[in-house]
Image (cartoon, rainbow, N blue to C red):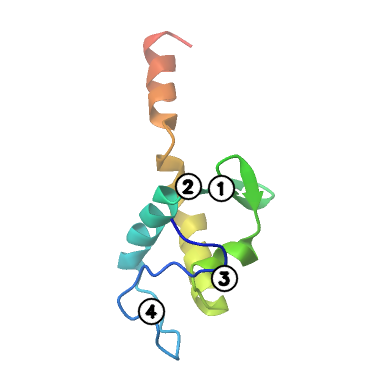
Amino acid sequence: MTEPDEKVKWRIHFNQLIARPIPETEYPKLIQRMFDDGLLCVLSPDGYQYFCGRYPVTAAAVRRLWGLSRAQWGRFMDYVYREDPFSHFGGDETDEKDMETNGG
């Protein structure tokens, strides 16, 4: 677990002066690390909201804590909107299967 205001070191080249673009192949790793740290992004027609547990967290705080530049954040959120990767966490698939088998 990270300390308050301590950036999460999830990449090998964490301390570079210039923020290189994050390859899309690294997004699943970043998302898994976020989820493992208790962070979840919920998409809606009105936008998105990050949660740590059941508490809302601002996108600026998430970006700052994970050490992402504005450009990296923009590309990452484009990926999140396109793929909705956080929807695969939290047991939603089980609920859908239960509804199918129970006729709901």
Any mark on residue 70, and which? none
Rounded to the nearest angstrom, the CA distance separating label 1 from label 2 is 5 Å
Q: Secondary structure at mark 4?
A: loop
Residue at the spot x=43%, y=49% of the render? Answer: 35
Mark 4 or mark 2, which has the lower sequence index?
Answer: 4
Q: Are marks 2 and 3 in contact (CB under 8 Å)?
A: no
Question: Residue beneath label 1, please?
Answer: 52
Of residue 35 and residue 85, the one placed in the foreground of this image is 35
Q: Are marks 1 and 2 in contact (CB under 8 Å)?
A: yes
Amino acid type, residue under disc 1 in the picture: Cys
Of residue 80 and residue 56, the one placed in the foreground of this image is 56
Circle 2 crowding by C-alpha within 10 Å: few under 14, some 14–19, many from 20: few
Question: Residue beneath label 4, please?
Answer: 14
Question: Residue beneath label 2, please?
Answer: 38
Rounded to the nearest angstrom, the CA distance separating label 3 from label 1 is 15 Å
Rounded to the nearest angstrom, the CA distance separating label 2 from label 3 is 16 Å
Residue most toward the right? 46
Rounded to the nearest angstrom, the CA distance separating label 4 from label 2 is 21 Å
Q: Secondary structure at mark 1?
A: strand
Give residue 6's position: percent from left, percent from top: 51, 69
Q: Secondary structure at mark 2?
A: loop
Of residue 29 and residue 88, the one placed in the foreground of this image is 29
Any mark on residue 64, and which? 3
Circle 1 crowding by C-alpha within 10 Å: few under 14, some 14–19, many from 20: some
Residue at the spot x=69%, y=49% of the render? Answer: 46
